[in-house]
Amino acid sequence: MAGARFLDPSSVPLKRQSGGNIWATLVHVTQGITVVLLLSVLMLFFLPVIQKTHRLQEEKAHLQDRINEELDQQHQLQVETEYMKNNPDYIEHIARDRLNMGKPGETILRFDPYQPETSNAKLAPPVSNGN
């Protein structure tokens, strides 16, 4: 109760010459500064927590994306496994394509993958045959 009487501007007998109560003004200014300081301290206290929460939410989103990618890959592997179990034509396709196998007496032709020309080859003039 003593603190409330201390902050009460009507209990302070000193007044400015112009008729205004300087103590009441100082009390309001002090209270405003105190509120701003308290809010600043609370903000500084919670700022690292907010930043950590934001960082963890980003990490969670990244991990969820990875989980979705891995689930898609798992689904593809399950489909491929089912094909291998139930479809002999698929097994033949895999043997020919990935393992470079062929049937007896069959000639296998392999071509190198396409590689685009370099920029120097495009600038060279065409070669004429001497006509």
Image: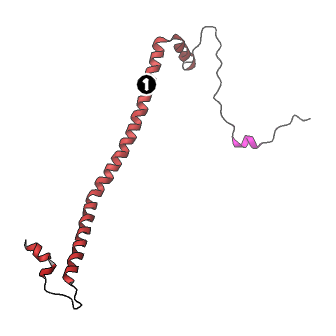
The residue positioned farthest toward the right in the image shown: 131
Front residue of 14/65: it is 14
The residue positioned farthest toward the left in the image shown: 1
Find residue 41 and report its horizontal and vertical position in percent. 25, 64
* Quadrant in the rendering for residue 120: top right
Image position of 16 (left or right of 92): left
Query: Label 1: which residue?
Result: 75
Q: Secondary structure at mark 1?
A: helix
Q: Is 118 included in the stretch rendered in magenta?
A: yes
In which quadrant of the rendered image does the C terminus lie? top right
Find residue 117 and report its horizontal and vertical position in percent. 69, 37
Q: Residue at x 7, y 74 (%)?
A: 2
The residue positioned farthest toward the bottom in the image shown: 17
Image position of 72 (left or right of 96): left
Front residue of 124/83: it is 83
Task: Say above or below: 31 vs 105.
Answer: below
> From which residue to which does the magenta span run?
116-130
What type is the residue that disc 1 sits on?
Answer: His
Image position of 116 (left or right of 4): right
Q: Residue at x 41, y 37 (%)?
A: 65
The number of numbered discs placed on residues in the rendered structure image is 1
* Magenta stretch prevailing secondary structure: loop
Q: Is 29 included in the stretch rendered in magenta?
A: no
